[in-house]
Amino acid sequence: MTRRRSAGILLVALLTLGATLALRVPPAAAIDMNAVAPDLDLPGFKITPFVTERAEYESNVFQTPSHAKDDLIIKTIPGIVLELPLGAHRLDLGVRAEFLHFMDMDKQDATHVFLLGKLALNFPGGLSLAVKEDFAHTTDPPGTELTGRIKSTTNVLAPSVEYALARRFALGADYNWTHVNFDLAAANGLDRDEHTWGLTAFWKVAPKTDLLANGSYGFKEFDHQSQRDVDRYIGVVGVRGEITSRLVSTFRVGYEDREPRDSDRTAYRGVVASGDWVWTPTGRTRITLLTERFVAESIFATNLWYLANMVTLGIEQRFTPKLTGTVRLFGGINQYPDKVAKLNGVRAWRYDELAGLGVGLDYQIQRWLGIGADYTHTRRDSNFDNFDFKNDIVGAKVTLSF
């Protein structure tokens, strides 16, 4: 029996397992802690443990231009989600692990850990505080330049404060610390700490809509290559909240001046943008447009950075209360600032075109049991041919939540 045939059998077996469990396991739901321990007096306090068993076939595990290596990957994904409303305050926390087992390339077996938390405090008089924590330890490719399995750890801590000075006007201050570390020697030149401080003015143009203007200063310090250190000056304007009753946005656009502390290095001075637009034309349809234009760190030849331009369109359609379909289209361009010699000796600026398609179908058999299947195709076409690749992933999953 070939490995591809074995992969297909395993994907079908996972979906069959979900249907079987629906008949044999009694119903369950998120644990309502106020019902379990009423003395807590915490209405809305819920804890939801879950476990997902996922199998996926990947056609080009290392995302190489030729001689691609495929494999079947089994992922066991346990996790827990905590929701804790405290009157006007709220704490949300999600933790999950991923245990990856490669059927052939067992040296690629890995354990991933993810943590996402947010604490929001809202006080009388217009004062609000928030702290966000985002931690990831993974071997998934970090961004669109590096490919293959690369172990990395990223931690982002972002506290912020906002105060309403008047009915329509508010001021905010924020700080963002990002720590990045790579285990791969070829990439550890990107190990770094990033710090950014910002001030934002908000103007409320509608009860749930703010226009904003933000000015920020930040710097990046690299652990092993100080010539990469930069100072950053950023100014953006944007919108936050509801544009209409069915359209919500967090979009920001502006200008960044990225100055290397080593004056011989190439600077960036230009437009940056980030944020999304979420449109819900009906109660069952959700359309998301994510736009990004930012400067990313690079290890390509003499280039210390590249300009990433990405657009992602996502469509989610709930066909029935239990059946949901998703479609994701994405494309982008990476532009490099310094010329490099190609294999034929001609010097050129590297230019990558990125594209992809993802489709998925999820069926919630019970409140506590769901199954799903998905397919993703990604590709990169570069004027430096040795960076081209195509990759296809076919997956199926079963999720139990309690």
Image (tube, rainbow, N blue to C red):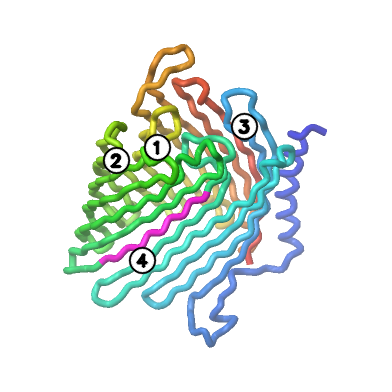
Amino acid at pointer 2: Arg
Quadrant of the rendered structure where residue 392 is? top right
- Mark 2 sits on what residue? 261
SS at badge 4: strand
Above or below, 273 against 2 in this view is below
Q: Residue at x 38, y 68 (%)?
A: 120
Local secondary structure at mark 2 = loop
Crowd around label 4: few <14 · some 14–19 · many ≥20 (10 Å): some
Residue 130 position, x and y percent, is 36, 66
Residue beneath disc 4: 130
- Left or right of residue 222, residue 210 in this image: left
Q: Nearer the viewer, mark 3 or mark 1?
A: 3
3 or 1: tag closer to the N-terminus: 3
In the image, which disc is placed on residue 310? 1
Name the residue type under label 1.
Met
Res 291 label: none
Q: Are marks 4 and 2 in contact (CB under 8 Å)?
A: no
Picture residue at 23% right of the left edge, 51% below the top: 215
Disc 4 versus disc 2: distance between alpha carbons?
32 Å
Callout 1 secondary element: strand
Would you say 288 lies left or right of 369 here? left
Tag of residue 60 = 3
From where the camera sits, is residue 366 visible? no
Give the camera-side residue of 224 and 235: 224
Camera-near label (2 vs 3) is 2
How far is mark 1 from mark 4, CA to CA? 28 Å
**Residue 378: x %, y % from top left:** 53, 33
